[in-house]
Image (tube, rainbow, N blue to C red):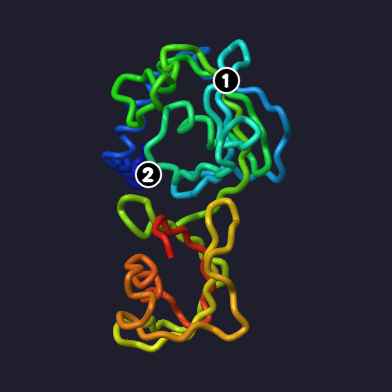
Amino acid sequence: MSHDDPPPAPAKKKSPAEEAAEKRREKLTPGSLMKAVIRSGRGDATPADGDQVILHCTIRTMEGIVVNSTRREHGGKGIPLRFVLGKSKMILGFAEGFPTMLKGEIAMFKMEPKIHYAEDDCPVTPPDGFPKDDELQFEVEMLDFFKAKVVTEDLGVVKKIVDEGKGWETPREPYEVTARITARTADGKEILPSKEVPYFFTLGKSEFRHLKALRWELEQWHARKKQLFMLPVPI
């Protein structure tokens, strides 16, 4: 290197979360996580840290016996799972497998026990009677993923901006707000219908005051912004 060359840029320091993920990844060994594509997805984008993924999952033994599923036809509730990559607690096989999937893809992941619920210090607990010490097959359908903003630390509220708003000012108590709001359960059942006439209320004083997460979100809105966000509380 000549005297005129600039010094090399210092290596970027990894965050504690990145260091933990890298250390956890060391548990992967050849053959511990295998993937087979059942149905190809669309596009070429795959989910990354900060994205919320929405998916169906069916878990089977190596003999094909279903032990757990989100699908109604396999005894589940029909409600997809939701995770925020890099933030939600999940098994190692999911953390490594989800980022390889396209929207609409169905894949089968074969996982050794140490990659799913038998992992040392696994951050999630399996249901009672779950065969965590067996090699298992996880059939995953990647329904959707998108860049999400985590609103609450427990990941109970996650939002997606559908249309950006205008201006810089956002409402706060005791501002009067006019908004169109529709609420649905995770399986699509409408519990707060959309109306031709928008809802009108005063932040902190009207019928939405008990929804702290919704109130916080409204205070971040710009005029004419449209957002989709998930709330774990009843309306």
> Where, quadrant-wise, is the N terminus in this rendering?
top left
First-in-chain label (1 vs 2): 1
Which one is in front, 63 or 155? 63
Residue lying at the far left in this picture: please name it: 16
Q: How far apart, in angstroms, are the residues tagged by discs 1 and 2? A: 26 Å
Q: Name the residue under label 1.
A: 60
Looking at the image, residue 126 sits to the left or right of residue 53; the answer is: left
Label annotation for residue 48: none
Number of numbered discs overlaid on the protein picture:
2
* Amino acid type at image mark 2: Lys
Residue 166: image x %, image y %?
50, 82
Q: Is residue 210 above or below residue 125?
A: below
Instruction: Locate residue 18, reporting x and y percent.
Output: 33, 38
- The percent position of residue 154, horizontal first and vertical second, equals 32, 50
Residue 147 in percent (x, y) is at 50, 54
Q: Quadrant of the C terminus?
A: bottom left
Asked if the residue under mark 2 is in contact with the one under mark 1, i.e. CB atoms within 8 Å, the reply is: no
Name the residue carrying label 2.
87
Q: Nearer the viewer, mark 1 or mark 2?
A: 1
- Which image quadrant is residue 118 in? top left
Q: Is residue 114 above or below residue 10?
A: above
Please report the residue visible at 48 percent of the width from the left and 62 percent of the height from the top.
229
Q: What element carries label 2?
A: loop
Structural crowding at the residue carrying mark 2, measured as other residues with C-alpha within 10 Å and reported as few (<14), some (14–19) or many (≥20) = some
Which residue: 39% across, 84% down? 169
Query: Left or right of 80: which side holds 216?
Result: left
Going by the numbered disc 1, the residue's amino acid type is Arg
* Nearer to me, 220 or 166: 220
In-front residue for pair 87/231 = 231
Task: Judge left or right: residue 38 versus residue 156.
Answer: right
Q: In which quarter of the image is residue 24?
A: top left
